[in-house]
Image (spheres, rainbow, N blue to C red):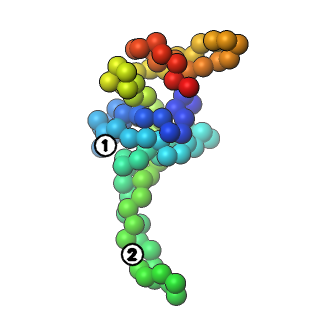
């Protein structure tokens, strides 16, 4: 999976197509990512002795193939390539050619 936590991504398919957000967490075994403000789901929490009943709005996971890395330099979605620089494998933006991490 090419997307990592704290990457800025653009949703390229689904009901939230076009939205941009940061990756909150990744689920590599299921090839899914949780993006801030995307795929909002409503969860109803029952009242307990310590907390009142409430309706929570949480981000749900979406498939990693439905998001694309957002390059801030090119101001557009871009693919990610891999190169070896200084003996380390790094992720590189295909549009701008800059090292991501």
Q: Which residue is rendered at x = 38% and y = 58% of the image?
A: 41
Mark 1 and mark 2 lie on one chain; the one further toward the N terminus is 1
- Secondary structure under tag 1 reads loop
Instruction: Find residue 51 and name its label.
Output: none
Residue projecting furthest to the right: 87
Residue 11 point in image, percent of width and height: 36, 36
Residue 66 point in image, percent of width and height: 41, 34
Q: CA distance from mark 1 to mark 2?
A: 25 Å
Q: Nearer the viewer, residue 20 or 30?
A: 20
- Secondary structure under tag 2 reads strand
Q: Is residue 32 left or right of residue 21?
A: right
Q: Which residue is rendered at x = 55% and y = 42% of the image?
A: 26
Mark 1 closeness class: few <14, some 14–19, many ≥20 residues within 10 Å: some
Residue marked by disc 1: 16
Residue projecting furthest to the bottom: 49
From the image, which quarter does the C terminus lie in?
top right
Q: Which residue is rendered at x = 42% and y = 53% of the image?
A: 59
Q: Which residue is rendered at x = 41% and y = 71% of the image?
A: 44
Q: Is residue 32 visible?
A: no
Considering only vertical position in the picture, is 42 above or below 18?
Answer: below
From the image, which quarter does the N terminus lie in?
top right
Residue 2 point in image, percent of width and height: 54, 28
Residue 23 point in image, percent of width and height: 47, 41
- Camera-side mark, 1 or 2: 2
Instruction: Find residue 54 and name its label.
Output: 2
Considering only vertical position in the picture, is 14 above or below 56?
Answer: above
Q: Is residue 16 visible?
A: yes
Q: Nearer the viewer, residue 76 or 87?
A: 87
């Amino acid at each position: 999976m090419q997307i990592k936590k704290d990457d800025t991504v653009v949703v390229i398919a689904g009901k939230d197509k076009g939205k941009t957000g940061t990756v909150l967490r990744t689920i590599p075994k299921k090839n899914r990512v949780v993006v801030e403000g995307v795929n909002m789901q409503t969860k109803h929490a029952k009242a307990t002795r310590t907390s009142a009943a409430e309706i929570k709005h949480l981000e749900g996971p979406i498939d990693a193939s439905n998001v694309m890395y957002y390059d801030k330099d090119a101001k557009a979605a871009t693919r990610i390539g891999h190169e070896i620089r200084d003996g380390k494998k790094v992720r590189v933006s295909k549009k701008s050619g800059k090292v991501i991490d």
